[in-house]
Amino acid sequence: MSAAASGERHTVLNPATGAAVREVAGASIDETDAAVARAVRAQRGWAGLAPAERADALRLFARVVADHVEELAQLEVLEAGHPIGSARWEANHVAQVLNYYAGAPERLIGQQIPVAGGLDVTYHEPYGVVGIIVPWNFPMTIASWGFAPALAAGNAVVIKPAELTPLTAMRLGDLALEAGLPEGLFAVVTGAGSVVGQRFVSHPDVRKVVFTGSTAVGTEVAAGCARELKPVTLELGGKSANIVFEDADLEKAAAAVPGSVFDNAGQDCCARSRLLVQRSAYDRFLELLEPAVTAWRVGDPADEATEMGPLISAAQRDRVASYVDEAEVAFRGSTPGGDGFWFPPTVVLADRSARIAREEVFGPVVTVLPFEDEADAVALANDTIYGLAGSIWTESLRRGIRVSRGVRSGVLSVNSHSSVRYTTPFGGMKGSGLGRELGPDAAEHFTQTKNVFYATS
């Protein structure tokens, strides 16, 4: 269900045209509190269900989502400007994540620990209500990484979507009720981060917070949670390195670059926005890269052939342009123009100390930096406050192992740009976050361990 009836209103815009899509009301503090109170009541009954019953309920929710993939995808195209092919993948991903974590309730297994004088047992108990603060770049998928394992563990969830992209979350709230989840268990509370998000942090009945967004805001969220002594999972910014060694398959590596940084118009914390190329292969690699970049299809998100849509807003477009204006552009792709928030795929050359080489641009821009040898590559990759993702291209297994162990990032790929699978852990190091999402242990992260000793003597 959705909770928003008063407070400020926000107009959702279509990023491809700039046209208004819908007005959405922002919840007040009182309305946020009411949603939390309903979640508290719903959670008690939900946690009291047999694990198999919770599992069945999540599987039904997954089936309902799967039946509405096209509708959810079209909403994502409208509010976020994602190409329709990507949006369908994202909607299907939500159903898959729900299905995966439907297996968790019956597998949250405690331990029996040998002790003297009795029996010692541990239990995994849910926190109660979990607040999930979702960004605008991947609204559906990132929301599901929080709510699916949290529900599986026996929690209720209150979800705050980004003001720019609330529509898919609101529809998921409707589908949760349609699937038979209890009223209040899955609450979508629209509104400003300074109101709804801040209340999730300060409310005593929200016992854990999951936040995805910028490192600056995430730091404030973490500080607020620390004051309340509540745990927090943070998935924050990135400035990931794509390292190409001279022994790599250069043609394959160059062809893969656009997908690593221009997907979702570069509005991806995992984007490989620093392209590190060994100096001996640098010139040849740029020759191979240019046709791959100029061929990247930017256009109407509703077109099945489109590979990249617009940026989310005019403000984001201007922010990206401010970085590129300071850099040397090597080459770039094209955009359809018009009233949308378009920005072309862009390759820039810069010094290692340049702002564009160090700060998260969050747009379709990649900075190419040469390196000398393996030690220099690792040092350059690690020369950032971030540590989320990255890629290593080499034909040497030994080098791939050495470099992957040396780079301080949470999610790495060798001869690939894969970052996210719901079956494997995801999360960053350093300024890229705290904790892990996804993977086989995610549901356990939404529980507290209780230890009970039963005396037998």
Image (cartoon, rainbow, N blue to C red):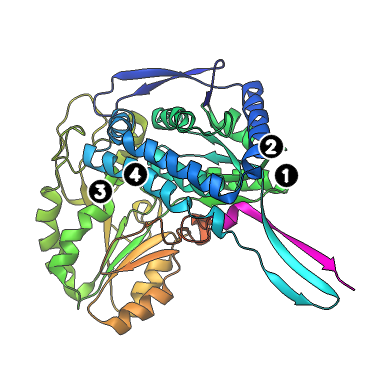
- Is 157 situated left or right of 411 in this image? right
Considering only order in the chain, which callout, 1 or 3, is on the residue closer to the N terminus? 1
Considering only order in the chain, which callout, 4 or 3, is on the residue closer to the N terminus? 3
Please tell me how crowded label 4 is: few (under 14), some (14-19), or many (20+) other residues with Cα within 10 Å. Answer: many
The residue sitting at 41% across, 42% down in the picture is 62
Q: Secondary structure at mark 4?
A: loop
Contact between labelled residues 3 and 2, with CB atoms less than 8 Å apart: no
Residue 231: give x, y in percent of width and height: 65, 51
Specify the amino acid type for callout 3: Phe
Q: CA distance from mark 2 to mark 1?
A: 7 Å
Q: CA distance from mark 2 to mark 3?
A: 37 Å
Considering only order in the chain, which callout, 4 or 1, is on the residue closer to the N terminus? 1
Label 1, on which residue? 228
Tell me if residue 235 comes above or below residue 171 in the rendering: below
Contact between labelled residues 4 and 1, with CB atoms less than 8 Å apart: no
Contact between labelled residues 1 and 2, with CB atoms less than 8 Å apart: yes
Specify the amino acid type for callout 4: Gln
Residue 194: give x, y in percent of width and height: 58, 30
Tell me if residue 350 comes above or below residue 408 in the rendering: above
- Is 5 situated left or right of 419 in this image? right
- Is 277 situated left or right of 174 in this image? left
Specify the amino acid type for callout 2: Ser
Does the magenta portion include 34? no
Label 2, on which residue? 202
The residue sitting at 27% across, 65% down in the picture is 416
Label 3, on which residue? 262
